[in-house]
Amino acid sequence: MSILVTGARGAVARRLVSLLSARGVEHRLGSREPDIPGTVLCDLSDPATFPEALAGARSVFLYAEASGIDAFVKEATAAGVEHVVLLSSSAVLDPAAGNQLATAHRAVEEVLLASPLRTTLLRPGAFASNALGWAGLLRAGLPVRLPYPGAHTDPVHEADLAEAAYAVLTDPALAGRAYTLTGPQSLTFADQLSILGRALRRPLSYETVTAEQWKAEAVAHIPGPFADALLDCWAAGDGVPAALTDEVSRLTGRPARSFATWAEEHADDFRDRG
């Protein structure tokens, strides 16, 4: 069994590759920036890179990229791929969600499910690693600017996502289903900052800003449609606890890691490096 792991520079893919390597599972890495030794060029928006990347693969761990998904399915089928595990998003579960985040992931899911490829869908909610977006301000001792500090999310550790992906890639009995993956707690952004503060051994603060202010500040690193999608999600979760599942433990055999665990492991990312 050979597994192609796309998005090799991503946090989940890196953790997955470590698991596959440690257990001796044959795999190859694909990336649009193949700067890691042994990585093949695989740009999910460029179909010309698909044939070489897919050669010999029987399973694929796939990041969602709607622009090239039709060509990817065609090439994967021709290459003899049997199983695709898609890192999707729980945003697809809201039938009323028409934002770009939900639409893009839903489009990829629909193409895969209509294909001859056996498809497993991993649908995480919020990544715990989204908190890294606050690192620059916190390293500088500045408050985090939040449009909805009371918005709840279900932060899930990237290691849990990788272990879930490993489980469905290596156990045929788990494949061909959809899994909604969450962390073990519903936490507001204010809660997350409090937990990070405990990990850093210092209090952290935030400043409430308008949605328009936040979007104007985020435009340099978050495209407008995705910023709008995030704002919509946060507004809907303001004061509303996130729904949680036990599917991480179902797939991995142990409880999902807490945000406090993630914060302790990543505390150095938030400390002044001067």
Image (cartoon, grey):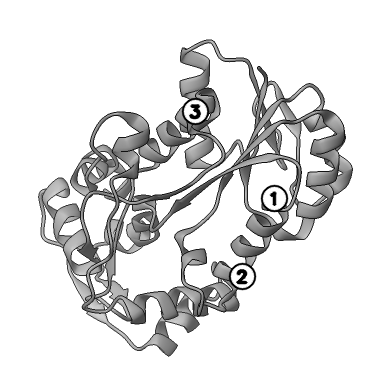
Query: Tag 2's secondary structure?
Result: helix
Q: Residue 191's x, y, as percent?
A: 17, 63
Which residue: 27% across, 56% down?
A: 244
In this rendering, does residue 274 appear at all? no
Which residue: 84% across, 50% down?
A: 71
The amino acid beneath tag 2 is Thr
Front-lying residue, 30 or 202? 30
Query: Tag 1's secondary structure?
Result: helix
Q: Residues within 10 Å of mark 1 (few under 14, many from 20)?
A: many
Residue receiving disc 2:
103
Residue receiving disc 3:
173
- Relative side of 250 to 149, left or right: right
Q: Residue 72's x, y, as percent?
A: 79, 46
Front-lying residue, 185 or 228? 185
Marks 3/2 in contact by CB < 8 Å: the verdict is no
Quadrant of the drawing holding the N terminus: top right
Marks 2/1 in contact by CB < 8 Å: the verdict is no
Separation of residues labelled 3 and 2 (CA atoms): 29 Å
Question: Which numbered marker is on residue 104?
Answer: none
The amino acid beneath tag 3 is Ala
The amino acid beneath tag 1 is Leu
Separation of residues labelled 3 and 1 (CA atoms): 19 Å
Q: Please state which of the two labelled residues, at mark 2 or mark 1, is closer to the viewer.
A: 1
